[in-house]
Amino acid sequence: MASHLITHIKLLVNTRTENRLLRGTELAELPCIENAYMLVEDGIIAGYGKMEDIPASLLTVTDQTDATGQLLLPCWCDSHTHLVFAASREEEFVDKIKGLSYAEIAAKGGGILNSARKLNETSESELLRLALGRLNEIMQLGTGAVEIKSGYGLSVEGELKMLRVIKKLKEISPIPVKATFLGAHTYPEAYRENHKGYIDLIKNEMLPQIAKKELADYIDVFCETGFFSPEETEIICRAGMAYGLKPKIHANQLHLSGGVQTGVKLGALSVDHLETMDEDAITALANSGTIGTLLPTAAFFLRMPFQPARRLIDAGCAVALASDFNPGSSPSGNMNLVVSMSCIQMKMLPEEAINAATINGAYAMELHDQLGSITVGKKANCILTKPVPSPAYLPYAFGSNNIDRVMIGGEWT
């Protein structure tokens, strides 16, 4: 049995003996142990506690790390990304700076359709190479589990190609990967005036093949004005649910789209974005088992109002944080920045942000039994910080890389 002992940890962060999705005031409770040790055996957390209580037998473990002055916390669980894409879109970034609107950029061939065109022109092997590079990058930034969506194919073969790439990533990635089918990201040009035709394509051609080849865990829809209505969202989600895919919904990003209420009605695992919320949407979410996933870097990049995190938390909603890593509206998978921005711009307490990016993020991917906290029996996917004064220093020092090393499956990367 391969054993590794980490000793003299200044603060062992988010130690839990049981799993619970956190909501309301619970989100501010971050259990920690000062001057701690943690034992890893065969990639699994096997024990932890105070250094003064360490069993003498453990001190004979030959593979040890001295973490004096450093914090050890569970890896980030990023439950909303689009990291399989063919090319960046910095030319649109410049157009936005010059004052062009989303509609004007789309008229020039930009937006989601731009990514779809480039993806359909790119080989599967090249998409995999690019995505693997991004996956390795976010792992070095402390991400220990990730959800990846399709949605840049917008054709039967394009969507299947994306999902095959994600499935391959699942097979070769050292961190858990969840796959989400987002064929309903926007309407392709050919179906712009024929919504029923595209929905039928999703239902009758995409979903049967996705189910047969086991290419997805979840189904997602961009429920938004000008995209998919709540009624269309429900039709598509129920079609996916018939094949065993659980819904996760892009909701209330640009308008009060009804996406939150639709997600709650469907028992969605999460409703994501939530920049635009009213009391009805907040109440519906608070009274449900659905997680509200906030994506502050997307609001930042698009210069939109940030998600009303304080209102959501104070109302008793279960909140998670994710990066929305994608080429159009959040070209970064840096969860450290997400945590910082949540504190700085959404007034989340550091404890709330860390919990939302770890244990609640794990719940938003149904990985809470494996990840998201320092718990005996969970995977040893952990972040070892550089010497820092406290957990609050991590979001406070937003421009610094405070990660010393990342452990994935009990191995330092």
Image (tube, rainbow, N blue to C red):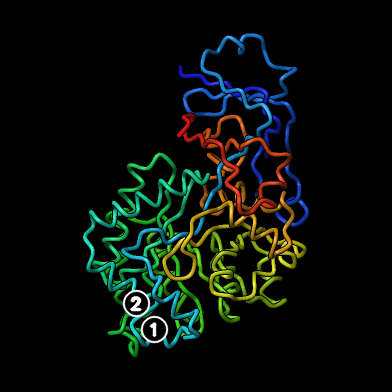
Q: Kindly report the distance in space between the C-alpha atoms of the residues bearing marks 1 and 2.
A: 8 Å
Picture coordinates of residue 233 (x, y %)?
47, 75
Task: Tell me which residue sits at (27%, 54%) in the image.
Answer: 213
Q: Residue at x 46, y 17 (%)?
A: 1
**Location of residue 238 in the rendering, given as x and y in whole percent from the top left corner:** 44, 69
Sequence-first disc among 1 and 2: 1
Q: Are marks 1 and 2 in contact (CB under 8 Å)?
A: yes
Q: Residue 191's spot in the image, x, y percent?
A: 31, 84
Q: Is the residue marked by circle 2 packed among few (<14), some (14-19), or many (20+) residues within 10 Å? A: many
Establish if 228 lies above or below 78: below
Can residue 20 be seen here?
yes
Return the residue nearer the eye: 394 or 348. 394
Query: From the viewer's perspective, is residue 76 above or below residue 191?
Result: above
On residue 113, the disc is 2
Please report the residue visible at 61 percent of the width from the left and 51 percent of the height from the top.
Answer: 360
**Which residue bears the numbered disc 1?**
106
Q: Nearer the viewer, residue 391 or 159?
A: 391
Residue type marked 1: Ala
Q: Residues within 10 Å of mark 1 (few under 14, many from 20)?
A: some
Quadrant of the snapshot with the C terminus: top left
Q: Amino acid at mark 2?
A: Leu
